[in-house]
Amino acid sequence: MTDIAVIFDMDGVIADTNPTHNIAWRKFLDQYAIVPTEEELQNHMYGKHNSYILSYFFKKNVEGAELTQLQFEKEALFRELYTSIAEPISGLLPFLKDLKQNNVKTGIATSAPFENLDMMVERIPLLGQIMESMLSERDVTQHKPNPEVYLKSAERLGISPDRCVVFEDSVSGVKAGLAAGMKVVGVTTSHGPNELPPCSAYIANYDSLNFDFVKQLLS
């Protein structure tokens, strides 16, 4: 094995799920007579944990059993909408295979519920076959932009944070990767480069990426 790890967020990074999350949030909030603007979804949904999103839109602190129930309703709706259309972002699978051929450790670090991660692995089986670490919201106590999920991923992979490259699409996710002391690549599925904190590189997809790209980021 090399002393390099590549860690992926899930939504907007493994797969472009955010358009479906957008629809799911609108359908869910409509049941509670809440009509979000596109700007609100951009600023208060992408990359945020459900506890924050629900507290923002319900205009109160949503926690405990209420959080569990509301999150279950919304995420079940998302999975119902997305399961049949799930697919990886263009070029991801060849990129992953090239990383493994070069003995790079890989992991997923998402703020999403475990059930969503489980669904993604079921729909894209290669993920379950090659990822040495997969963390979801249930594995951490603090959510992005806190770096806990990335630091815990590095620990599980046995790689120093300064030898890890993170792929992220959200402002909070990029901040988490940077706070962990890792190189961060911005994936522009949700935000343009000018909307994200400064990253080491920006990509729209993985079509032209290979091990050399990662190695150069860490050189």
Image (spheres, rainbow, N blue to C red):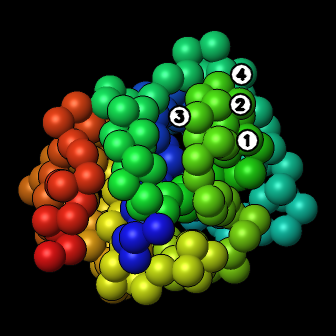
Residue drawn at x 55%, y 15% as measured from the top left:
85
- Residue named by callout 2: 122
Gap between marks 2 and 4 measured at Cα: 14 Å
Viewer-nearest residue: 112 or 57: 112
Q: Earlier in the sequence, mark 3 or mark 2?
A: 3
- In this rendering, would 195 be left or right of 174? left
Three-letter amino acid code at disc 4?
A: Glu
**Residue 109 appears at what percent x and percent y?**
55, 61
- Residue named by callout 1: 118
Q: Secondary structure at mark 1?
A: helix
**Residue 53 appears at what percent x and percent y?**
56, 56
Three-letter amino acid code at disc 1?
A: Asp
- Residue named by callout 3: 21
* In the image, residue 94 above or below residue 98: above
- Residue named by callout 4: 80
Three-letter amino acid code at disc 2?
A: Glu
Q: Earlier in the sequence, mark 2 or mark 4?
A: 4
Residue drawn at x 65%, y 42% as measured from the top left:
129
Gap between marks 3 and 2 measured at Cα: 18 Å
Gap between marks 1 and 2 measured at Cα: 6 Å
Q: Earlier in the sequence, mark 1 or mark 3?
A: 3
Q: Secondary structure at mark 4?
A: helix
Q: Secondary structure at mark 2?
A: helix
Res. 128 image quadrant: top right
- Asked if the residues shown at circle 1 and circle 4 are in contact, with their CB atoms under 8 angstroms apart, the answer is no
Gap between marks 1 and 3 measured at Cα: 16 Å
